[in-house]
Amino acid sequence: MVRKPTSKETARKPNMREAILAAAEELFATNGFNAVSVRDIAQAAGANPGSVTYHFKTKDGLLLEIYRRHCGPMNLRRSELLAAAKRVRDLQDRLEAIVRAYVVPAFTSGSDLAGGGARFTRLRAVMSAEGNEVARKIIAQTFDDTSHAFIDAIHESLPHIPRTDIVWRSHFLLGALYYSLVTPERVSRLSRGEADGGDAASAIEQLVQATVAAFQAPPLDQAAPTRRRTVATTKT
Amino acid sequence: MVRKPTSKETARKPNMREAILAAAEELFATNGFNAVSVRDIAQAAGANPGSVTYHFKTKDGLLLEIYRRHCGPMNLRRSELLAAAKRVRDLQDRLEAIVRAYVVPAFTSGSDLAGGGARFTRLRAVMSAEGNEVARKIIAQTFDDTSHAFIDAIHESLPHIPRTDIVWRSHFLLGALYYSLVTPERVSRLSRGEADGGDAASAIEQLVQATVAAFQAPPLDQAAPTRRRTVATTKT
DNA sequence: ATGCGATTTGTACTATCGTACAAAAGATCA
DNA sequence: TGATCTTTTGTACGATAGTACAAATCGCAT
């Protein structure tokens, strides 16, 4: 059934509000928050600077709305995939499924909103690097629950690993994930064209494979207890 | 022998040029390039905005000088440690030594310049996220040689892994490394205080241990060939 | 067609940005 | 001490930032 739009939802151009959101998302994700002006965004969206103020009041409000748009759907998707992963019997398979449930929504469209979750994940990476206050608050509120759920699930499938180690390795996973989206061309360059850093499918498989192995590494306490630790403090 | 400073090197205050560099490094690393104004830097350094222009001409020039200061010493240190690591006999030990040679200089002071390599590495992470042009050029010029040297060394100690996989996993290592320096407090928070994300020694050990395991993961081609791959494309 | 609320436009205001530049101050050596 | 060079200071200028606001415009129900 096709709902008739009320006057509250109508807009002159197809959807200027969405166009502004998409343009801002793209520009913020590639250049950072402060490097992009409201005028840049408006121009990229084919809109007037005043329209941005009208729809989102402030530049911070625009960023806030971008987060609001994506956080819910992406975390919902992750929860669904995590629930499915937890039902996997084999422990090794389950671990891989859990990691995949964490990684896949970050790369692919978690909500089909304006073209994909990869762009939003990259945005998160950049905001995190810049120490953006608006983003920091939302992240802590919205993503920590999800992170804990994944950490717990991983911990259950790797009971002999201390929770502290799981946290560290999850952190490394997120860092690797972010960096893959921030500078994919570096992979292409260093592999001399043999790999395409921008290919999401490759990135996902490589990341899942590497991360599963990292999680399965022996815990730090008992790591190589018989071998002399190579101390890397050298004199120059 | 104590060299008498020439008039070209003298300065009224202990070393205003260094103070500006240190302040800029700190501010850029925590807030990004565009969020920090020349006036912010001058104030943090106890200097006059004009002094920044005098010493570094432009804001880009200041960033450039920060890179020049650190790149050489850090890569030199890495080369030394890598050379030492390559002499390790046991393949497992050698791999760990190589990874450590890559990680340690990024965390600890690579040059004793203004307080440590961790700050500079964090700066690199933030500039990379922001897509800073000045940084991008220097990185590609200066660090790719080092990266290739490490990739080759790792490949030699893991000959059965395709080079492409090594590249991906090195990329993940750098991403994890960056992220550990960008948001260490997230580790503390998620571990509920059981771990200190800001502790360099812990970060290094955790990162080395996890990364070595990641490098040792089976190559993608032959990964779990008998198991059905869990395809994470779900319908909503 | 007309009136009305929603949206877009155009413009302007203030603040701050990077940077230039002349003057002041300090250091060095004949 | 006084001349000279280096460094610091203070100020100013043009550009651009975020945002506010009134006028113009559009879509739609009546």
Image (tube, coloured by chain):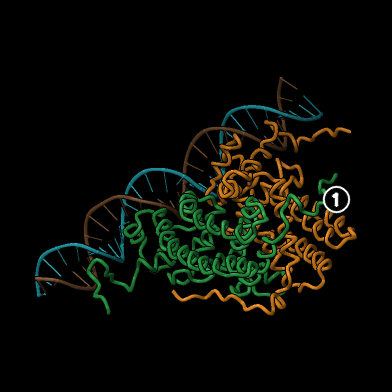
Chain colours: A green, B orange, C cyan, D brown
Is any atom of residue A34 visible in this view?
no
Q: Which residue is painted at 27% across and 68% down in the image?
A: A9
Please give the residue where the numbered disc 1 appears in the rendered image: A228
Along the line of sight, the residue nearer the viewer: A181 or A15: A181
Binning the other alpha carbons within 10 Å of mark 1 as few (below 14), some (14 to 19) or many (20 upward) gives: few
Q: Which residue is painted at 65% across and 46% down in the image?
A: B56
Q: In this rendering, is residue B130 above or below A198?
A: above
Along the line of sight, the residue nearer the viewer: A97 or B64: A97
Label 1: which secondary element: loop
Q: In this rendering, is residue A134 above or below B139?
A: above
Is any atom of residue B26 visible in this view?
yes
Q: Which residue is painted at 55% across and 66% down in the image?
A: A86
Quarter of the image where one finds residue B8:
top right
Image quadrant where one finds the C terminus of chain A: top right
Left or right: A219, with A126 as reference point: right
Along the line of sight, the residue nearer the viewer: B83 or A168: A168
Q: In this rendering, is residue B169 above or below B186?
A: below
Along the line of sight, the residue nearer the viewer: C15 or B22: B22
